[in-house]
Amino acid sequence: MTGFTFFKKFGWLLVFLSLKGFTQITISGRISSTNGNDIQGASITATPLDDTGSIAFAFSKKDGVYTIRIITSADSLNITVSKLNFLTQNRTIANENRRLDFMLEAGAHELKEVKIKPPPLRRMGDTLRYSVSEFASEADRTLSDVLRKLPGIEVDPNGAVLYQGKTINSYYVEGLDLMGGRYGLINENLSLTGIASVEVFENHQPIRIFDSLKVSDRAALNIRLKKRIVTSYAVHYGVGARPFLWDLNITPMVFTPQMQMAASLQSNNTGRNIRSQLINHIDGESMGGEIPSTGGWLSIPPLPIPAFSSSRWLDNRSNLGSLNALKKYRNELQVKVNASLSIDQLRQQGNKMTTYYLPKDTVRFSEEITNKFRYNTVNGGVTLLRNLPQKYFQNQLSFEKEWDAGSARNERKDIAFAQGLSTDQYTLKNNLHSVFKRGEVIYNLYSNSTVAQTSQNLQVGLRGADSSTTPYQAFRRKKLNTHNYAEFNHKIGKLNFATKVGNCLDFNRIYTHLEDYPGLSAAVNDFSWKSSRTYISGTTSFNPRSPGWFFLLELPLSHNYFSYHQQGETRTLHKVVFEPRLFARKRIAPSAQLIGSIRYQNQLPRPEDVYTHYIMTSYLNLVKKNTNFRNSHLLTGTVGMNYNNPVAIVLGNLNYSYTRRVNNLLGSIYLGSDGMQEIQTLDRSNVQQNHIVSGRLSKYFLGPKLTPAISLVYMKNRMERMLNGEVGHFEYSTFTPSLNIRYSGLNKVDLSYNSSVISMWNTSNTSQQYSQTFSLGVHPTKKIYVNMCLEHYRNNLNMSRKDYFFSDALVRWSPGKLRHSLEVGFSNLFNTKTFQTISASDYYYNESSYNLRPAQIVVRGRIHI
Amino acid sequence: MNFLFLLLSWLYGWSQSGKQDVYIITYSFELQQFESDPGSIRRGEAVLFSYGDSSIFMDRAQYVLDSIGSSPAFRSLERSERSRVILSKARPVFGYSIYKNYDNESIIYQESVNGTSFSYSESLPNISWEIFKDTATISKYRCQRAIGKFAGRTYEAWYSNEIPIRDGPYKLGGLPGLIFRLQDNEGKIKYELTGIELSRTAHKPELKRSLGISKKEFQKRKDHYYMNRAEYRSNTGTRRILAQGKEESLDEFYEGIKQEYLDWVLIEKE
């Protein structure tokens, strides 16, 4: 530094110091204890009187002597001497050189303890760990209460868990998968007291030998417990009024490193949807070509349900029993047994106004509707699993039997329909999967076999002003499906090659019989459907050393054969299709990654695509598909970004996807003035386009415990349809922004606010549905918890507007240490009787009014241990 | 030999202090691992056990593993069960422990290289901290900003007079209060205080029995180990190795270790 630049930089400071009267003073002295010992290592700090922070410091030496040099313009100074285990001393002195001795008195130093707490969100490699104690409030009892509060995690109304907007692919408790996809039972009943943290494994590959070999874009959830052995009991018993209400739940669970068990008995008629606890939210590995087992084709159309708590609308009598056990042996073999039974009765009442917008006409009708459904399901399975880093073996044998009955009355001014539907079906399935390594090659062998049978009967009683008929439809189906493949994975340098050879066979025998349909002679379909898909697929994945990149290229080539055979008629199709897919991922920062994929697919015929005689699929639909085989071409492109920063606790994502589908068949709908639909398919090429933009962002503020989250989804569909003989282009869009704020910063108060708008517009209509919910939970004393919730819904349909207000209240008294509590719950305090829901598609519009449960009160005892 | 004696006498002094209260101070840290990759951040928690005039600083995960290892309940477990417990715990990010003694102004640095525990002793760094008037409240404490240089890096520290412990993460300290936040000006080293607890019952870390050598000698041995890993390998007949999901020949693997070592971000540049 030259003299000139030195002067330029600091000269002004010297001038400034001399102008302001800055002087350097030296204070020295000795620090000793009251019993005369010299104190070493005491800190001496000098602070101006205006308390703008200390300006100089020093430490006392071995003999207790210190010297502190201070430059300041202040007239007086505070000198503070402190040392651990001595009381701090303060003295105010004039700004001048002097000697200053201190004698310190022994005493405990007051420490504002900052409790060691794990950070609320922590990242370890691909694992994100949420500390449950940070997000849970005192009122929370079960895992699901806190799960929906975690930033980045959502729980949908059916109980499916989503991370960054995508459903999870595995659910573990301490690394073990007890429930398969039916994790709702654990979520809804596992007591919070035993849970330490919730972990998210990003890009989770459930098969360990495929770790880092086969990527997944899905995450898994793992519940970490506080102790090695945790037992949890959820016991509820409740009674209520208007009408007589009951609510019972006994759900014990045990988790140890070697054994896990969850059992449950539940019964209620209070509107609590317990059947959703047994929904399987995880579909198996998506295997190119495995044809999902579709049940029956006949149905009673349900009333569209309101999008709020089921306790206000679900008129039910539900019973559930479930027993699940997992035992892990020393050789890592896991044996799992699951069995569940659900007996459920539902009732829906309301009315529905349907409007169809035809190219030249509008059809509108309105009905009073009463639906009664009985769903009875029993399912179970035995699973053997060995999931090691060098070897994977799984065999799962499962069965499901369902017997349902439904009845409905739909009344219009001049006509009434009575419907009765019975369904009886079973599925038996065995799934064998083995992966092992020999030399340099990883072998992946898979075999799945399914046998299913469905039987349905639909009877519709149609009573008009001057006529009455009772058409009857029978449907029988037997199905055998097998899917087998062998895959060979080989690694050369940074490239991984997988070659897969497989075959999927599907045999169906379908019989349908329609009689007494007005204006039709009896219609019988009796056909066999066979399909065989033989494929060979090459997959290359590339994991370059340059950090963060990953590529995957799939090149499957398949030969497909379809045969439809009905007496006197056989149709066959041979088709070779090539369906490439490219996926790329790049980590652009420790917290952010970009993903992109492009895929070309064919949608090939299915059994439900061809039948030459009419089937009455519901009381208003008469369908016949006497056309060519379906062959649609789909092109899908996706780009997106995921962001999660565990330090700032910000999680978000933004995705865009585009699908273009070219169909060789066009659905043609003939609508009668009474809403009866006759559906056929025509050989006519048409294009369908779909755009989806979705994004969400949430941030957790550590101090105030505040979580604001925003999300938006925009969707636009454009397609061609033939309505009453005229071809038209139809468009349908929805836009759904929403805002959610949670606050639990005050010790005894929990606040949450939710607001969303669903805007829909199709070719001829627009509507908005606004919703706002506000919930306040307060602990006025340690033992009492009060929760109030207020909800407002507004439906704007063209020019009309309807407002709905709801309020629920809960008072809970928790007397003892047993986590036993007694609560009184009031629901629908304003006794709102009906609620209007709107649903729409490109060419129709439904407004339905759903009869709600009346205002009611339930007294419940709850034990969560 | 002299060193070992010194170490043992220090250890004796240490076990005396083990009876008193200890302040358990936890820091979360973010340390950049490689100079060439700003994204190579390693996160974790460190713990500082302070007795006022002396302290031990180590990776919290290491402390957890050490305290499990010394518990009789753990020792009575079967081998497979023990490894299950160990594997379920977080892995430490760094392996060294730093023992500061403010009374005799010395530091003992302990780290294992290839299974042998080494330690060296040096004087406490004399950091000339410049303090500023900026203040902020961190974890309920009023903190003040200071800037100082240590071993070739410039650090910004936020310390609080309210806790008269002149200590902080790694070898840093010497401010008239505990360091709550520490960050170097290149953004490669970050510490933030996450907890303070006063305890009499917590398991107290002990100085590991180690071979005392000079700092220069220690650095020489560490360099030699990472730069010539192949020499330290016991011959198991392995030809190829799977590292981070990629299969490599042993030569490639050892060259990779060397290149990574040369690219390490060093806390002490000088």
Image: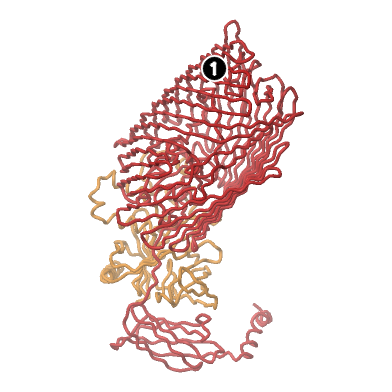
Chain colours: A red, B orange
User: Please, is residue A624 above or below residue B79 in the view?
Assistant: above
User: Please, is residue A461 above or below residue B197 in the view?
Assistant: above
Residue farthest toward the front in the current orientation of the protein: A466
Res A591 seen here: no
| A189 or A703: nearer the viewer | A189
Residue farthest toward the right in the current orientation of the protein: A360
Give x and y (percent) for residue A383. Answer: 37, 30
User: Please, is residue A175 above or below residue B262 in the view?
Assistant: above
Q: Residue at x 31, y 48 (%)?
A: A228
Answer left or right for A482 relative to A363. left
Instruction: Please state the total of marks drawn on the protein image.
Output: 1
Give x and y (percent) for residue B21. Answer: 30, 71
Give x and y (percent) for residue A350. Answer: 56, 36
Task: Give the residue at mark 1.
Answer: A473
Give x and y (percent) for residue B166. Answer: 41, 75
| A363 or A762: nearer the viewer | A363
Answer left or right for A220 relative to A631. left
| A340 or A258: nearer the viewer | A340
Q: Residues within 10 Å of mark 1 (few under 14, many from 20)?
A: many
| B122 or A800: nearer the viewer | A800
Q: Residue at x 66, y 16 (%)?
A: A627
